[in-house]
Amino acid sequence: MQKVNIVSVPADLKKGLEFVSRAGIFSADSSSKFKIKFTPGSGLIVKPFPGGAEIIYSRLCQAFRGLGIILGKLSSRKKITALSETQRFELINVMLDVSRNAAPRLSVLKDLLIRMSLMGINSLMLYTEANYEIKGEKLFGYNIGRYSSKELSELDYFAACLGIEMIPCIQTLAHLRRLLQWDQYRNIKDTETVLMVGETSTYDFIEKMIAAAHAPFTSKRIHIGMDEAWDLGLGNYLKKNGYASPHSLMADHLPRVMEIIRRHNLKPMMWADMYFRAGSKTGDYYDLNAVIPDDVIKSIPDDISLVYWDYYHCDPDFYRTFIEKHRALSPHIMVAPGVHSWNRFFPAYQGALDTMIPALRSAKEKNIREIIMTVWGDDGNEYPLPAIFPLLQYYAEEAYNNKADKTALAENLLGSCSMNYHDWFLAGNIDEVNGLRSPGRHETCPNTSKILLWEDPLYGIMQPHFLGINIKGHYQELCRELKKTKKGHYTEALFLITLLAEFLSRKADFPAFLRQAYKNKNRSLLRKILKKDIPWLKSKAKKLWQSHRSLWHDINQPFGWETIEARYGTLFFRLCTLEKKLSDYLAGKSLLIEELENDALPVFPLAKNEMPICQYKKCAGAVFDSY
């Protein structure tokens, strides 16, 4: 912890600095020889003077970023030099998914806010599908990590003291499976995930959602979702009313939601994809040949911002083109890249950077004023939250500069999060296996570690796609390197990834190795597998589960852990079943192991070095729908 003597603090900074100091980021010590002075002014300027530095700022987020920069220099033992930065975007937002299994504890969200403030990020949205409090609706958020209005109000005040605007982020059409699973809400249910458009009871409930969602926050802005309503109108709506096109239903639904929004004097934003899908023959958001019908364009309200989300393209020209296509629909456009945290045990750092950088630089070039960094948690939210911090720091560097400088990035990450840039980017190689890439437009690596961890040890359904690739060697080398990393802040998250790499150093090709030994009738090798390999895998799987369980409960509320724990349980007991089958086979109690009699077949039509990003159900069983 750095000791500094803060000699001049404007009133609007005092409470926020108290929060940062109380969190152990720095110690305010009047006896310290290093002095920091805060001065309101224009832009963000760091001016060194003998024995200290002055931070000149025009916004609170700039003052805290200046502090983060100075703390980074002090931690790196580097000389503080004069610095001037320009905030390139009015809104620098992070949207954190707290609905897909993992809902972080209040203390963890406060820690996140402090780290964001020291980066200069000035807005946070918690993506809450159905886990905020609505008075009288006891099943809304039941057992999924619901945040009370009091907790959200407390967060809002905490964030405001750090120069961060909290904005409610909800869904008002789709992605509502966790709500619509309850029979109590069948009268507003179209499909498993989509609300029943056109029903008065639906809009009565949406008004309750909107009123409850924005009440804890001082901001008048709200994100109303509206994305990926794949089966809109194809469930109970179809049975009751007959077929209606998705864009006609959207044209009916959105104005009624906007009436509610206007009654509450809110400023809305929504995901833009459904408009583009309406104009594409294939329903593709990123179809450059899409022609959006005039009636659809005319139905877009003038007082809503459209969010162009894109996590998949590496070509700046594509972003420039698509920004203009969005501007043809509305003058109020926001750009949203993503940290590639979804479907993974650890974010795909390189994939995130390969898509984030052209998105943000194109946004600067096109004079976009508001950006959102999305942090999704699809398929279990298995990744540890601190793993996103290096990418958020990179995001902030791009938001305050023409382009991020890697030396400054490493120093500033040390100042904001006490994290070693090299160590965390090393852990980001957990999925970067020998040039493997996802097919199609996914310009990133597959979620290799997740696939290989949960893959059934007997069936090994994904193994044919790894033939000729030294996956085992990758994890052996990565494990060796991770064990050399320095202890620091959030070490538990790095330890989890080290354990995962160690486990995969023997599990990665184990199903193929087992099958080959069985096919060759190599009984001595099968005995070694029984006596050494399987007990080792069981022991390491247990250790990985215990580490993950401990980390999860430190970071998140307990709700949702049962989903991950069931996966560990399946893995462990499948190893136990394999152990029994192999023991019986070698003892002559059974003549064969039926699961190993079939040849292993490729299950995807893929080119060499291609592997899709797979969710749990696609790798954990004998067939894709077995779980």
Image (cartoon, grey):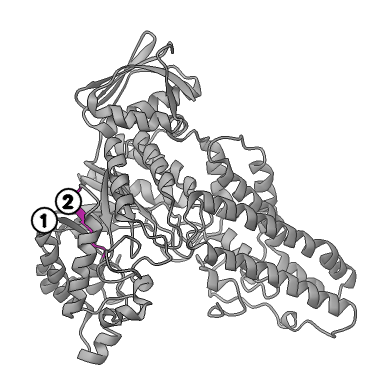
**Magenta stretch holds residue 584:** no
Across and down, in percent, residue 135 comes to 27, 64
Which of the 4 image quarters holds residue 593?
bottom right
Does dot 1 land on a helix, a strand or a loop? loop
Is 308 in front, or is 604?
A: 308
Q: Amino acid at mark 2?
A: Lys
Is 335 in front, or is 419?
A: 419
- Give the mark, 2 or 1, whose residue is nearer the N terminus: 2
Q: For the point 85% across and 85% down, which residue is it? A: 591
Q: Amino acid at mark 1?
A: Asn
Which of the 4 image quarters holds residue 259?
bottom left
Q: For the point 30% across and 82% down, which residue is it? A: 186
Across and down, in percent, residue 533 comes to 79, 62
- Region of the chain picked out in magenta, as a range: 219-225
Q: Work out how far the residue at label 2 is from the one at label 1, CA to CA, in angstroms.
A: 7 Å
Q: Mark 1 — residue?
A: 265
The answer to whether the residues at label 2 and label 1 have Cβ atoms under 8 Å apart is yes
Classify mark 1: residues with Cα within 10 Å, few (<14), some (14-19) or many (20+).
few
Which of the 4 image quarters holds residue 108?
top left
Q: Mark 2 — residue?
A: 220
Taking the image as shown, residue 225 lies to the left or right of residue 261, namely right
Q: Is residue 383 above or below residue 298?
A: above
Is 373 in front, or is 384?
A: 384
**Magenta stretch holds residue 223:** yes
